[in-house]
Image (spheres, rainbow, N blue to C red):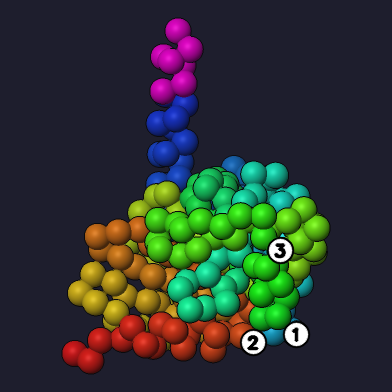
Amino acid sequence: MKKSILIPLLLAAVVMAAMLLRPGNQEHQAQPVSGLPWQIETLPDGNSQVFGLTLSRSTLDDARKYFGPDMEVAVIAQRGETGTLEAYYSRVTTGVLTGKMILVGELGKETVERMREHAVKSKITENNARKFTLSQEDLALAYNVPVASITFIPTANLDEETALARFGRPGERIRASEQVEHLLYPEKGLALTLDSKGKELLQYVAPRHFARLREPLLSQQTTH
């Protein structure tokens, strides 16, 4: 009996998410929806607000209070690199949309190295990076670190037509391959990756730090 009730509710949630991703529907909502990926507020100091957080100012603890306690915090490092402090959510709700989210802490190299040295354990991830589990002392410190960047991977597919309707015309396009293209919005601090055969990716930084986001993407650019 419970299954017969839950299935229609789940289907209704998926339909609602698809409607919001399609242009022209948000204006018709009875109640305004906040926290959507395209609701970016730029600030006079060069920072920006998105998902209820102010980049380079709000902390990981602020994000935990906003999105819930199911935050997985660790240092993630590729081979030969120091790594970064990251907080991961396997599922968050932004407005009425769902997806995965990764928040990177604004932390100096020396502090990251110290956290690695004090880690209680480490293991290799599916992406061949090494994940360092923080000590309780370093975990408490990590929660007070400002959020430098946010990556959101929506569950619903985001095509080019919808992206342009919601975010506007990009300031720059970077073609990485036949199936992957990056749409860059420097004034918003956003890089939107469209993948015709995979999942879309939205990366946010404070607009004043946009070069940090753009430069790695330029290295992926195809020459033809």
Separation of disc 3 and disc 1 at Cα? 36 Å
Q: Is residue 124 above or below residue 190?
A: above
Residue 47 shows in the view: no
Q: In the rendered structure, which segment of residues is drawn in magenta? A: 1-7
Instruction: List the residue tagged with mark 3.
Output: 118
Q: Residues within 10 Å of mark 3 (few under 14, many from 20)?
A: some
Name the residue: 20% across, 74% down: 178
Q: Position of residue 209 (x, y in %)?
A: 61, 85
| Residue that sits furthest to the bottom in the current view | 223
Q: Is residue 187 above or below residue 22?
A: below
Left or right of residue 28, residue 209 in this image: right
Are the residues tagged 2 and 1 within 8 Å (C-beta)? yes
Which type of secondary structure does the marked residue at label 3 adopt? loop
Q: Amino acid under label 3?
A: His
Residue 150 shows in the view: yes
Separation of disc 2 and disc 1 at Cα? 8 Å
Separation of disc 3 and disc 2 at Cα? 33 Å
Q: Is residue 138 magenta?
A: no
Instruction: List the residue tagged with mark 2.
Output: 208
Q: How many marks?
A: 3
